[in-house]
Amino acid sequence: MQRPVTDRPGLQKHGLVDALVPTVTRKNVSNKNHQDSMEIVHKTAFPPYSITLKNSQHNEQRTDRKLVEHLILEWKNKNGFELDITGRFGHEKRILIFANNETTFEELFDQHKPRSNSPAWKRPVPVDSVDFVETVFRWNINEVQDELKITYPPLIKLTIMHSFINKPLNLVRADFCSLEQVKKLMDTGRISIGHMKNTLKQYHPPAKISKCMKCFSHHHNTKECSSQVQLCVRCGLNHPFNNNCQNEIKCVNCSQDHYVGHLACPEVRQIGQNQKIKRTHLLINQEQDQHLCYVFNKQTFPPFPSSPIQQQNHEDF
């Protein structure tokens, strides 16, 4: 059964949303797909609602968490009901709202509530759709960090990531002092910050790939180089060293049109991939070592022989 979702008084008045629509339809689960459906219900008990934000300067200045908190407050003031919801950003300035209980879901779904300025309804999003976070971070990173430390005590700090041109990215790195805490978060795939859910992925530090500054090989350092000539970093040829080389840019390792050591170089990418695999194996081995059980073997580790003084003290007792 499918019913349209109506807006509530106050949301249009305060310019918060353009539309509030359910992202999936309600269907009976067949026996054939019962197992798959139960897996979906376990992750999110109710389908999300999609809120489209208006293009206003007031909304642009709000953080993702503040928008959801504002929705809860406005809904309570205008409808006398406090929503129990969790949200996360979706595609094209949309926020996905997840009801945490059946009462909240029915409150959002009920079409018999008074409506005003009914929005234009959009086609529901398929159940298997994927939403990517495409909003620019406007977080107060210290405020979010203090809030997360209450929920996750092993958290050390949060760091906003930047590109190679020092432009802020839509990524935040979280450093923890507990490998077990990281594993729990990676198993769920999301982290809750207030009323928002944010997607997680494993962080891999940039690969530090060294190279010889004489022949620019990645397989030995400068001290170990046996070459008798100094190659040009721009063209890879042997010519008098100066900063005015006008030859075509050519990598000495792969013969492509980029400087030596560039991230686009196939050899650099292969070395970085090998380092990533090696770090993954080290993490796996470290986790397995934490669960090893050691049994004391007297034959392998015999006790130290006791001295005559220790024997005398033992007899006195």
Image (cartoon, rainbow, N blue to C red):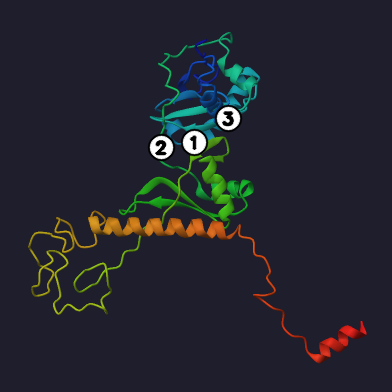
Label 1 sits on a secondary structure element that is helix
For disc 2, the neighbor class at 10 Å (few under 14, some 14 to 19, many from 20) is some
Q: Is residue 65 left or right of residue 305?
A: left
Check the image and report above or below for 309 versus 31. below
- Lower sequence index among marks 2 and 1: 1
Quadrant location of the C terminus in the rendered image = bottom right
- Kindly identify which residue carries mark 3: 42
Residue drawn at the location 20% of the way across and 79% of the way down: 226
Check the image and report above or below for 264 versus 12. below
- Lower sequence index among marks 3 and 2: 3
Whole-percent x and y of residue 308?
81, 91
Residue 304 marker: none
Q: Label 2 to label 1, Cα distance in Å? A: 9 Å
- Kindly identify which residue carries mark 2: 135
Q: Residue furthest right?
A: 316
Q: Nearer the viewer, residue 139 or 58?
A: 139
Whole-percent x and y of residue 83?
62, 25
Residue drawn at the location 34% of the way across and 55% of the way down: 273
- Kindly identify which residue carries mark 1: 64
Whole-percent x and y of residue 105?
59, 20
Mark 3 residue type: His
Residue 298 location, quadrant: bottom right
Whole-percent x and y of residue 216?
21, 69
Task: Answer yes or no: is residue 143 visible.
Answer: no
Mark 1 residue type: Asp
